[in-house]
Image: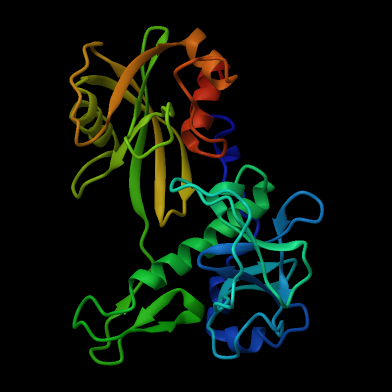
């Protein structure tokens, strides 16, 4: 796909500067160093004119002195860190929220009102390509630390190391590195139609492409065929790679593929998906425009929406 890297979260601009991680303590004292605050995984946004990431000075009062700073990289030679913000007495938010996505924009008492913490899933389509990619890196690495506080080798508590890109166990000496879980997401086609499905936990009427985790010893092509058959009972022949998307919820790599269906009969696994249907190109176009009475499309910013839009525009190749 010619514009594969236009997918949301693929546009990070930071130089990861892995050679500088051992020198992170000194870089924190650099006059040009800035930190991206995250609160419960939500990046700080400057909402004064649209939405963009808010990079604060290292000494900002929102940071507790002992909270670790993770070196994300450099921008124009200046260090860029991410740091978590501790809880404060948060008032009830007026913004509507739902179990599926948190739309709240939360202010911090030490910052001007136009600075707000926002759930990345809710704001991803509003951010620039650079901001979305940089925020994904920050959210993903903190999510990994939150779920890997103990050594997988001996069970003892591990410690943040290498400017946040490693955890080391003082008890047994084991080292642990950030993980990314690969997920295949499939644009399954049959003539002029695409296969869409939905999970019961999704908003009413929302349909998207089928997807599933890859398993050890499995190729991308095999995973596409297995997941499509397990979920919908559809056999798949030719499989082509299209694009990938870092998906920091919490730490997936979405591998977008096109698959050619060998039949159209559906046999759903109710433990996997609630419903599935073949949708014509014309109906899919109407659904994306909000004109279908049944189908609501996947959200903007998701690779499923990205692939569907390019299929409709004949821009997959």
Q: Is residue 148 visible?
A: yes
- Measured from the top left, where is residue 35 in percent x and y? 66, 74
Which sits in the foreground, 308 or 60? 60
| Position above or below: 248 against 3 | below
Residue 157 picture quarter: bottom left
- Measured from the top left, where is residue 168 in percent x and y? 34, 83
Q: Which residue occupies the extreme right position in the image?
A: 49
| Position above or below: 189 against 230 | above
- Measured from the top left, where is residue 141 in percent x and y? 47, 66
- Measured from the top left, where is residue 43 in percent x and y? 60, 63
| Position above or below: 193 against 38 | above
Count numbered badges in the picture.
0
Which sits in the foreground, 141 or 291? 291
Residue for point 69% across, 47% down = 128
Residue 92 picture quarter: bottom right
Q: Is residue 317 visible?
A: no
| Position above or below: 230 against 112 | above
Residue for point 62% across, 42% down = 125
Colour scheme shown: rainbow
**Left/right of residue 215 with respect to residue 125 in the rendered view:** left
Residue for point 23% across, 75% down = 152
Residue 57 picture quarter: bottom right
Which sits in the foreground, 100 or 133? 100
């Amino acid at each position: 796909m010619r514009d594969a890297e236009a997918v949301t979260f693929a546009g990070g601009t930071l130089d990861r500067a892995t050679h500088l991680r051992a020198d992170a303590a000194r870089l924190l004292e650099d006059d040009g160093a800035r930190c991206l605050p995250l609160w419960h995984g939500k990046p700080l946004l400057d909402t004064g004119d649209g939405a963009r990431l808010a990079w604060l000075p290292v000494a900002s009062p929102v940071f507790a002195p002992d909270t670790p700073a993770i070196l994300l990289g450099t921008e124009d030679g200046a260090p860029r860190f991410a740091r978590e913000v501790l809880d404060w007495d948060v008032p009830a938010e007026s913004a509507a929220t739902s179990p599926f996505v948190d739309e709240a924009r939360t202010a911090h008492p030490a910052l001007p009102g136009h600075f707000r913490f926002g759930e990345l899933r809710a704001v991803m389509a509003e951010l620039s390509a650079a901001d979305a990619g940089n925020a994904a890196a920050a959210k993903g690495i903190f999510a990994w630390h939150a779920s890997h506080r103990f050594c997988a080798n001996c069970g003892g508590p591990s410690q943040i190391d290498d400017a946040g890109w490693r955890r080391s166990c003082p008890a047994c000496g084991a080292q642990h590195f950030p993980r990314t879980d690969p997920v295949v997401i499939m644009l399954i086609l049959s003539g002029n139609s695409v296969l869409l499905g939905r999970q019961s936990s999704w908003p009413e009427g929302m349909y998207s492409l089928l997807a599933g985790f890859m398993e050890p010893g499995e190729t991308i092509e095999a995973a596409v065929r297995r997941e499509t058959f397990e979920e919908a009972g559809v056999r798949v022949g030719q499989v082509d790679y299209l694009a990938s998307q870092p998906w920091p919820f919490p730490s997936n790599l979405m591998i977008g593929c096109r698959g050619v269906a060998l039949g159209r009969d559906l046999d759903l696994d109710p433990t996997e998906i609630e419903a599935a249907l073949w949708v014509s190109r014309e109906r899919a176009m109407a659904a994306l425009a909000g004109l279908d009475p049944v189908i609501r499309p996947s959200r903007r910013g998701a690779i499923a929406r990205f692939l569907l839009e390019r299929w409709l525009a004949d821009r997959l190749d």
